[in-house]
Image (spheres, rainbow, N blue to C red):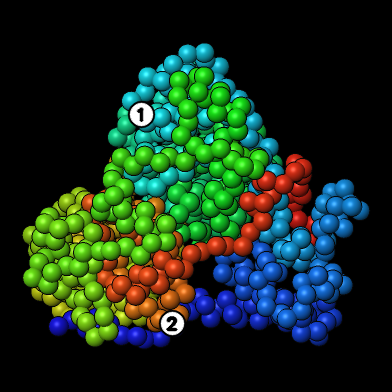
């Protein structure tokens, strides 16, 4: 029996405690700054900071249960010296730059910085949303001849005829293939000009590497792929970026993948650094987890009424010979002709296995899953029953056997002393995913259990300080090191090389090796959080969900987290959970408060929002 036994423990999630402390300190500071001891001010300031800590870009005042009419509450807020009502600003100022740290915009309350982020992102996206056909008359026929689905052809047509294109779709819907076709046709349309500057980027190193590998398989030649931080030229101290409005990127076509992971502040920085002449293609899956920091940009774009205008629908039908399979919107919004959803899945069928599970999660339906027979191994279940397995995880059960099954082949490989290339390839086949680091079902406990098992099988001393970096130990970087070129989320494998202990990292087609002693901060990586796994894919994944009602984990296990975890799998997924925890997760749908979607519908839109802060109040 292992020491991983399920309980209904209360988990100390440190980030929640930090958010509470920050919100309390912000409340105190704002009350002092506004010279107000009114409890309404204290409540509002606390809830505003708490909302930002929870990932919202603003506080929707209609969500406050104050017992006082909203109109009176807003009138009180307007009387505070630290609050500006932007309706008044719009009437009295021409630069629309509020001077207070807190902004009231309709029923939404913002810290000034996030109000400006939203305004600038909406204005930038709308300004870039212009028709701009490539200078090649035959490109339309080239698109028609592609071996691709109609939705992919439509996406490519948009990207070659507009400055901004937003392509959304789940795993297996052909986003990467679409990008490969797009780059090839763009190069051809521009005369295969060697001076063309095409860049591809993603929020994390892992996502960037995966995209680089996928594009390499499509014979697109050398295409620079990097993280957004590296693309923008983040300084070594992490405090700024080389590229911005005064020093824009040198790029003709920029493709950005995994946009759901990009927070509002980073999207603002990216758009500000992009020259007006550049084409921008944004890719992502709006059903995935939102960014760790405030904002939910891709989902906000997806919440805008979907579908093309009659004019664009007619243009596509005339050019490509088919009616685009997109709905007709009831409300006009700025980006409707720049946005397309890829619906056909080339990896999963919608009515079976992983595809069906993902669809049910998105639709809020608790899935009916086949429970693994205790007499069967997981491999036998996948072969005989379904690529989706449910291992009931009730209080008092011991999941140790199933955890070990995930790495049975890897542990067997370790005992044969393979070379590092074999280790890297083998380790990427499977991964255990957890909602958090803490708790008996958290990353820390699962990694500790599997490390002990690996050491036992390799006949190493039980003391973890002995042979710490044993041959085959997987590690994950937890802090960026710009000098070494290692970033938070990068995964490496320890190995021995002529008596020296090294760690190897796979970067696209190349392998980076360095001495273990030079590693920046790291953790073991048999198990990783679902957030860290975003942007990665594995053949087999195992997802651990705590029993429903285990506080405060039940606040973290949401529909988006479950969807993200199950769609990391290419071939099979095992859920260690009970049916109540699955139902609980699916019932908790993340709806971050934001005004971005509405700003893309509202008319008119300010095309020149303020860019640079004027004083220290913009820290808020």
Label 1 secondary element = loop
Please tell me how crowded label 2 is: few (under 14), some (14-19), or many (20+) other residues with Cα within 10 Å: some
Image position, residue 61 (x, y; %): 70, 69
Residue 397, quarter of the rendered image: bottom left
- Choose between 336 and 423: the one closer to the eye: 336
> Residue 122 location, x and y as percent?
67, 46
Give the quadrant of the C terminus: bottom right
Q: Is residue 316 above or below residue 37?
A: above
Q: Pick whichever, 467 or 172, lies toward us.
A: 172
Q: Which residue is located at x 8 percent, y 70 percent?
A: 375
Place residue 44 in its image quadrant: bottom right
Q: Who's the residue at 65% across and 71% down the image? A: 63
Q: From the image, tell me which residue sits under label 2.
A: 551
- Give the alpha-carbon distance from disc 2 to disc 1, as whole Å: 47 Å
Relative vertical location of residue 322 with respect to residue 339 in this rendering, above or below = above
Residue 356, numbered circle: none
Q: Is residue 469 visible?
A: no
Q: Earlier in the sequence, mark 2 or mark 1?
A: 1
Residue to which mark 1 is pinned: 148
Q: Quadrant of the N terminus?
A: bottom left
Residue at 58% in and 58% down? 295
Q: Is residue 519 left or right of residue 494?
A: right
Q: Residue at x 47, y 18 (%)?
A: 140
Q: Is residue 604 visible?
A: yes
Residue 202 in the image: x percent, y percent? 46, 47
- Percent position of residue 602, x then y: 72, 47
Query: Taking 448 as reference, is 324 above or below it?
Result: above
């Amino acid at each position: 029996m292992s020491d991983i036994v399920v309980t209904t423990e209360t988990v100390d999630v440190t980030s929640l405690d930090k958010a509470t402390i920050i919100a309390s300190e912000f409340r105190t500071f704002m009350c002092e700054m506004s010279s107000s001891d009114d409890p309404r001010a204290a409540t509002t300031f606390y809830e505003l900071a708490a909302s930002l800590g929870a990932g919202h870009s603003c506080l929707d005042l209609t969500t406050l249960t104050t017992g006082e009419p909203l109109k009176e509450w807003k009138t009180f807020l307007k009387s505070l010296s630290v609050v500006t009502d932007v309706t008044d600003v719009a009437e009295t100022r021409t630069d629309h730059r509020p001077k207070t740290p807190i902004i009231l915009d309709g029923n939404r309350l913002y810290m000034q910085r996030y109000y400006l982020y939203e305004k600038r992102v909406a204005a930038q996206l709308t300004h870039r949303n212009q028709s701009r056909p490539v200078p090649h008359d035959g490109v339309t026929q080239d698109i028609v001849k592609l071996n691709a689905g109609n939705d992919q052809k439509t996406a490519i047509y948009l990207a070659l005829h507009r400055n901004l294109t937003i392509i959304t779709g789940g795993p297996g819907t052909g986003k990467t293939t679409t990008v490969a076709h797009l780059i090839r046709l763009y190069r051809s349309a521009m005369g295969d000009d060697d001076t063309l500057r095409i860049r591809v980027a993603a929020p994390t190193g892992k996502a960037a590497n995966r995209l680089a590998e996928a594009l390499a398989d499509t014979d697109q030649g050398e295409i620079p792929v990097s993280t957004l931080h590296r693309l923008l030229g983040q300084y070594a101290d992490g405090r700024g970026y080389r590229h911005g409005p005064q020093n824009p990127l040198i790029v003709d076509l920029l493709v950005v993948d995994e946009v759901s992971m990009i927070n509002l502040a980073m999207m603002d920085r990216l758009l500000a650094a992009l020259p007006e002449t550049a084409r921008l293609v944004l890719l992502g899956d709006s059903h995935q987890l939102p960014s760790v920091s405030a904002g939910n940009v891709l989902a906000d774009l997806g919440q805008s009424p979907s579908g093309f205008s009659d004019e664009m629908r007619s243009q596509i039908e005339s050019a490509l010979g088919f009616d685009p399979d997109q709905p007709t919107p009831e409300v006009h919004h700025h980006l409707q002709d720049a946005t397309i959803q890829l619906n056909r899945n080339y990896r999963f069928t919608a009515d079976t296995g992983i595809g069906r599970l993902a669809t049910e999660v998105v639709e809020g339906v608790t899935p009916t899953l086949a429970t693994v027979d205790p007499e069967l191994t997981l491999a036998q279940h996948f072969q005989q029953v379904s690529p989706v397995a449910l291992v009931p995880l009730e209080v008092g059960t011991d999941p140790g056997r199933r955890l070990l099954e995930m790495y049975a082949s890897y542990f067997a490989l370790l005992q044969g002393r393979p070379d590092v290339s074999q280790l890297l390839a083998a380790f990427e086949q499977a991964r255990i995913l957890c909602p958090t680091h803490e708790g008996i079902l958290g990353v820390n406990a699962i990694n500790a259990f599997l490390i002990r098992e690996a050491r036992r099988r390799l006949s190493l001393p039980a003391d973890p300080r002995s042979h710490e970096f044993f041959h085959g130990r997987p590690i994950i970087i937890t802090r960026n090191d710009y000098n070494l070129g290692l970033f938070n989320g990068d995964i490496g494998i320890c190995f021995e090389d002529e008596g020296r202990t090294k760690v190897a990292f796979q970067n696209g087609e190349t392998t980076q090796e360095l001495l273990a002693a030079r590693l920046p901060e790291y953790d073991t990586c048999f198990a990783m959080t679902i957030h860290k796994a975003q942007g990665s894919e594995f053949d087999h994944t195992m997802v651990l969900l705590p029993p429903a009602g285990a506080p405060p984990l039940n606040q973290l296990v949401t529909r988006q987290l479950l969807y993200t975890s199950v769609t990391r799998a290419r071939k099979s997924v095992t859920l260690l959970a009970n049916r109540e925890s699955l139902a609980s997760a699916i019932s908790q749908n993340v709806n971050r408060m934001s005004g971005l979607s509405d700003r893309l519908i509202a008319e008119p839109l300010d095309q020149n929002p303020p860019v640079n802060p004027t004083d220290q109040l913009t820290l808020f």
